Image (cartoon, rainbow, N blue to C red):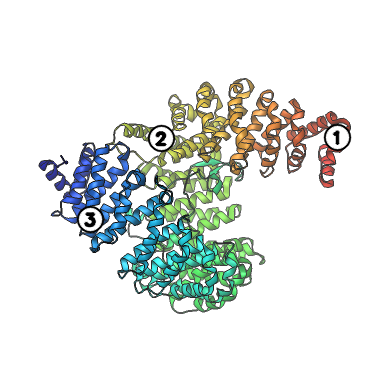
Amino acid sequence: MEWQPEPESLRQLIQLLNSTQSPDNEVQQQNNQRLEELRKVPDFINYLLFVLVAMKEESATARAVAGLLLKNSVRQDFASIPPHVLEYVKRKSIDAIGDPDTLVRHTLGTVIATSVALGKIRNWPEILPRLMQLLDSTEYPVVEGAWDILHKICDECGLELDEPLEDGTRPLNVMIPKFLSFFSSELPLLREYAIATTTIFVSKRSECMQPMIDTFVVELFKRANDNNPEVLKAVCRAIVALLETRPEKLMPELENVVNYMIYTTQHSDPDIAMEACEFWLAFCEQEELVESLRPFLSRVIPTLMRGMVYTERDLLMLDNGDDDAVVPDSDQDIKPRHHRARTHDHHEGGGAASGEDGEGADVGDSDDDDYEYDSEDDEDDIYSEWNLRKCSAASLDVMSTAFGDQVLEFVLPALREELASDDWCIKEAGILALGAIAEGCMAGMEPHLANLLPYLIQWFKHEKALVRSIACWSASRYGKWALFGSEPNTLKVYFEPLLAGLLETMMDNNKRVQEAACSAFATIEELAGPYMVPYIQPVLETLIRAFDLYQRKNLIILYDAVGTLAEAVGSELNHPSFVQMLMPNMMKRWEDLHTEDPHMFPLFECLSAIALSLGPGFAPYAQPVFERCVQIVGETLQICQQAAHDPSIEAPDRDLVIVALDLISSIVQALGDDSQHLIAGHNSIALQLVGMCMIDPVTDVRQSAFALLGDLAMHCFGLLRPQLEGIMQQLVPQIDRNFSHIHVCNNAAWSAGEIALKAGDELMQPYVNPLLERLIPLLNNENTPVTLAENAAITIGRLGLVCPTIVAPNLEIFAQRWCFVLLSVKDNEEKSSAFRGMMTMIGTNPQGISKAFLYFCQAALNWQTPDPLLMDMFIQTFAGLKQLAGSEWEASMSLLDPQSRQMIKERFNA
């Protein structure tokens, strides 16, 4: 007997679904709590599906809400759904395809696609044949519903569709020809579905797609002049996909393709124009193709520059009002912010830096960098969607990078005209273009900048806020020239007016201008670094005033600007007058902010930079900051543990733990050994929390925990000593030979080296071999990311310094790669300790270096300023090797080039 709902339970569910649209927050909370309870009911999924597919008398909204809840339940609980319930869902879903209501139909499509994606196509073999059959239906809702589901399945399961089924057939061999036949459908929506769905397999480089790619191209270009805007957008996306995956199919007709895309980039519909504009961005990112674009630059570049002008729709959505500085921001105005945990590398002064290089990303992360126009994005924040203007600017940027100064022949004439225009929209687009070409055409623009930069600074005061804001961004793109250009007295003549102009504009009465000016200022101070020192006082005065003027959204950028100043000027900020200007304001904000406030993240990061800059000068403020960090970590971990056992408790954001750990790290680094009294307080609760964070399921938490562990080892090892065995049991497994989580592995490897230096021979001996079993394979693997390989090498060197008798027998296995990896690391104390360890090992096992002798010579010569102790060890090591080699020494030295031989003789007396 088929399942049937219990009437009263069904009535209550319908009532609940209808009330989900209530604007009352209290009602919404009650609904959410009730729905969470219902999720535990065994046949809750059946009820939701019944409402979605069978209760046509109910509102489409209530049915769609039921469908969304059903989709979420399937996604979250798929593994635990009883087989008979899944079969009920599959059977009833197929029967309901083609519901007359579009919202319900598409919601059902999402449920089916989710079930297919999670359960795999092979476990629902009838779904694809049924959907393909429904494409031939005479009922439009059925055909459209089938297409909607197919598109979603293809998007979710594209790779699986390319694989043969148990009977040896490949679904796509049947599906793609059918899709291609719909390119000429009389119905525009079906043409759009067909093109968009087939393009998925072009983008995925589907094996089944390749034999049909020529047919795809022919059918696609038949739609090049389609009268439906959505179809035209799909055509443009498909051409971009071809350019990225099968460019050879476009090259024979490149001139016609380029002409078409130039024409379409100027389409009266800005959304179609934007999709066409993506072609230029994609073209310039194809290094092997970009040269083919050169003959068309004279027409492409003016097209892009015209595309940078604000459309009427842009201006309407921007709400381009002046003098809104006193208007409070809503929480919706503030973008979610995610903190990047610290990772230890050797290219930022040896400190712990955020893992922003591509090599540092965890395997499997999709942490793509945002397009460089970050300040420009800030300027258009209220209109944050990707649009024709931004795509045109991005395309001109990458084009100028690809072709360099050669684009100026086509940019400058239009630029002169636009910058001189009385139409502020045209002028604004010219300023945007000027900033877009900055990176690629800096050399060619230099002769013009002495005249152009003063104009940009002058436009900081333009009557239109959008001109003021884009002028700030564009000027910041030329900040390096203002600092280091070849003009005489460049700091006085260009940098100081630029800095003064930005500081003044930061106090603008328009919030968008404040944002652009503050972002531009942060860019400039980062470029300037120590050159900012003479201007600390006026900068601080402006920043403090801005704290009183800015609304919530811009305060986030202001915190960044303060933190960047601290990083730029370093210990120069630790002057009593500067500390007194800055810290009372920062501490007041620290005390007033609630832990849940979105501003906590930027404030944590800002205080971390300030602490490192002030060093011992941060001591008067360390206690309350440290204690609150410990409290936040403890409370967050406790709630996370409760949420793991009680689904009704919402797990807090673990980013709070990450920023708190990083701030504690900064305090430890700032105070050095004097931080021990903080760490030891409250029965060393901080150490217990660090231990919990080292085994946390979230990789970023573990990453920050091991960064803090390394700092604690340096400055508070006496507190770690009693817990060393437990710490090492947690640490060693995190050094993963497959570097699945690179940042965690990196920080664990680095902290092991710091522990070794403090622990000494006797304490460290039990852990050396387990560490070497992981570190040596990491070092010798040429696929290991650079920073991780460097940390592995340095820690091996430090283990050799502390426990040479254990490490030295392995010398021959890693010495060559060790020397090679550390060639690129600049001189610092960490590298010095590692080299002292290497030479201690050579003293213990001189034969171990024989096969890597030439590499060792190059690594030794690469040192620019070895400290006296290290230099003495180099001299002794070379003397020992020379004595051991005896008459064979000269033969070994002859393998070096003459210059290297001479340098070794002069520097190391060998």
Farthest residue, direction left: 8
Please tell me which residue is depicted at 45% across the width and 41% down the height of the picture: 659
* Residue that label 2 marks: 633
Query: Given this view, does label 1 or label 2 mark the residue nearer the observer?
Result: 1
Query: Mark 3: which amino acid?
Result: Val
* Residue that label 1 marks: 889
* Residue that label 3 marks: 104
Instruction: Pick the quarter of the image with the C terminus.
Output: top right
Q: Quadrant of residue 101?
A: bottom left
435, above or below 751, in the image: below
Answer with left or right where residue 892 lies relative to residue 536.
Answer: right
Could you say which is closer to the camera, residue 742 or residue 760? Answer: 742
> Percent from the top left, x then y, of residue 482?
60, 63
The local secondary structure at tag 3 comes to: helix
Q: Residues within 10 Å of mark 3 (few under 14, many from 20)?
A: many
Between the residue at mark 1 and the residue at mark 2, the CA separation in whole angstroms equals 59 Å
Query: Given this view, does label 1 or label 3 mark the residue nearer the observer?
Result: 3
Answer with left or right where residue 564 lies relative to residue 323.
Answer: right
Between the residue at mark 2 and the residue at mark 3, the CA separation in whole angstroms equals 44 Å
Could you say which is closer to the camera, residue 496 or residue 767? Answer: 767
Q: Earlier in the sequence, mark 1 or mark 3?
A: 3
Query: Mark 1: which amino acid?
Result: Trp
Q: Earlier in the sequence, mark 2 or mark 3?
A: 3
What numbered label is drawn on residue 487? Answer: none
668, above or below 487, in the image: above
The local secondary structure at tag 2 comes to: helix
Could you say which is closer to the camera, residue 848 or residue 353? Answer: 848
